[in-house]
């Protein structure tokens, strides 16, 4: 096979940028089709959100360290394209400040792909948009800069395997968590005070995972009142569905009658049929990409499974075959079902090692109980 050595540094740099562009579009833009769409279907900013050519735009992606917290672009002909193409399903959420705009993306790549069939940009909200700016703009600018710095330092430290690099990565993780907590606290405060207007409704839909189920229930009547008087607001209508499902994760709720495929044999079963009265049941969500959570589940099963605690694993994996591979690798054999969109929607879980503890009466007692706390609870029960 003949190989060609590229001597020109400029050519090598151009090729690296081209490769980065394609990879980013494949990740964020929904595959090769997204790469094509990004050129063909760019849409201009609309309404109150028009900006002048040459304006710099900052892209803020909360809770998305692995793909980079911030990117930037310059507006040309009333539209802009980031390094991964002109992303669709994004919303401009700020007004110019010293020639810059902030653009907020959804919090996960999955949601960004779900938005891909909708309008590309900008839902202008008039006065409420200015309200968001006054209340949130400085915080987000500072937090965005902090996240930008952390993401680059964190990714650099992961490459270096020495002890100091690992310690630095752990410290950056802690800083990242604090930054996210600060952002979450501000969003919760903004929504709680302003859920009666369009921006509050939009924020609540985008960031509902930041709200406890109890707080979501408390906000429910205000959301319903707004939705009745704004029937054309799709965000409010979608929120009502989410709030009804929120009842599934409140204390005292029963297991929802959702159907999943058992990992070991591929048989469809109802989740509520796996909860056994007379013993506590832990419904544990785990990911095939998170070996630590699977190992912890396996340890719990070996120590306490089948005694006073029944453990039902809900595996977030692309296939039953991959889930089965992880179950065997980490010794997590037991009752495991494959997660699907219905289960995720009913529990409001789209990622992460979440769990739900049901009592001997089959009613929900606790959410997100640590493995250590569970083991201590079981030890006390056996004494």
Image (tube, rainbow, N blue to C red):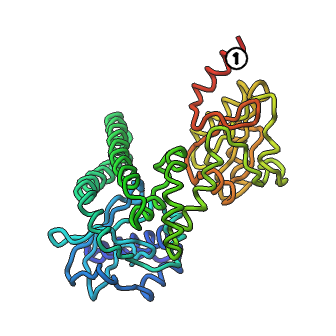
Q: Quadrant of the C terminus?
A: top right
Residue 240 is situated, as x and y percent measured from the top left of the image, at 57, 61
Q: Is residue 200 above or below residue 307?
A: below
Q: Residue at 36% of width from left, 59% of height from top?
A: 68
Residue 183 is situated, as x and y percent measured from the top left of the image, at 34, 50
User: Circle 1 sits on which residue?
Assistant: 381
Nearest the viewer among 295 and 163 is 295
Residue 199 is situated, as x and y percent measured from the top left of the image, at 39, 65
Nearest the viewer among 56 and 365 is 365
The quarter of the picture where residue 157 lies is top left
Q: Is residue 143 above or below residue 312?
A: below
Q: Residue furthest top?
A: 383
In-image side of 174 versus 244 (left or right): left
In-image side of 224 versus 300 (left or right): left
The quarter of the picture where residue 177 lies is top left
Q: Is residue 335 above or below residue 348?
A: above
Nearest the viewer among 107 and 27 is 107
Q: How many marks?
A: 1
Q: Is residue 281 above or below residue 109?
A: above
Q: Residue at 51% of width from left, 62% of height from top?
A: 225
The quarter of the picture where residue 137 lies is bottom left
Q: Residue at 26% of width from left, 72% of height from top?
A: 57
Q: Residue furthest left?
A: 98
Q: Residue at 38% of width from left, 57% of height from top?
A: 62
């Amino acid at each position: 096979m003949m190989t060609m050595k590229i001597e020109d540094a400029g050519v090598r740099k151009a090729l690296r940028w081209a490769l980065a562009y394609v990879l980013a579009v494949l990740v964020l833009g929904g595959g090769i089709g997204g790469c094509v769409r990004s050129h063909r279907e760019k849409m201009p900013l609309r309404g109150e959100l028009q900006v002048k050519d040459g304006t710099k735009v900052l892209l803020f992606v909360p809770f998305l360290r692995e793909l980079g917290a911030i990117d930037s672009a310059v507006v040309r002909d009333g539209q802009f394209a980031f390094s991964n193409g002109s992303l669709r399903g994004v919303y401009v959420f700020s007004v110019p400040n010293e020639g810059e705009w902030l653009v907020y993306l959804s919090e996960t790549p999955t949601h960004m792909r779900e938005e891909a069939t909708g309008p590309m940009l900008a839902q202008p909200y008039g006065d409420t948009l200015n309200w968001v700016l006054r209340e949130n703009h400085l915080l987000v600018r500072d937090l965005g800069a902090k996240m930008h710095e952390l993401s680059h330092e964190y990714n650099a430290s992961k490459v270096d395997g020495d002890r100091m690099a690992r310690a630095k990565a752990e410290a950056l993780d802690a800083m990242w968590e604090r930054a996210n907590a600060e952002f979450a606290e501000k969003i919760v405060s903004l929504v709680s005070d302003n859920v009666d207007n369009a921006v509050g409704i939009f924020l609540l839909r985008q960031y509902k995972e930041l709200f406890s189920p109890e707080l979501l229930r408390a906000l429910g009547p205000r959301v319903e009142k707004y939705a009745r008087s704004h029937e054309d607001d799709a965000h409010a209508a979608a929120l009502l569905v989410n709030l009804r499902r929120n009842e599934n994760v409140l204390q005292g709720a029963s297991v929802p009658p959702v159907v999943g495929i058992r990992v070991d044999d591929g048989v469809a079963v109802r989740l509520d049929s796996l909860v056994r009265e007379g013993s506590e049941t832990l419904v544990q969500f785990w990911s095939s990409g998170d070996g630590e959570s699977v190992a912890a589940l396996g340890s719990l099963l070996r120590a306490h499974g089948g005694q006073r605690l029944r453990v039902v694993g809900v595996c977030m994996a692309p296939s039953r075959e991959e889930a089965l591979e992880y179950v065997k690798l980490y010794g997590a054999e037991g009752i495991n079902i494959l997660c699907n969109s219905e289960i995720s929607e009913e529990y409001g879980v789209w990622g992460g090692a979440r769990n739900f503890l049901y009592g001997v009466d089959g009613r929900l007692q606790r959410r997100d109980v640590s493995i250590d706390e569970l083991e201590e609870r079981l030890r006390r029960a056996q004494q």
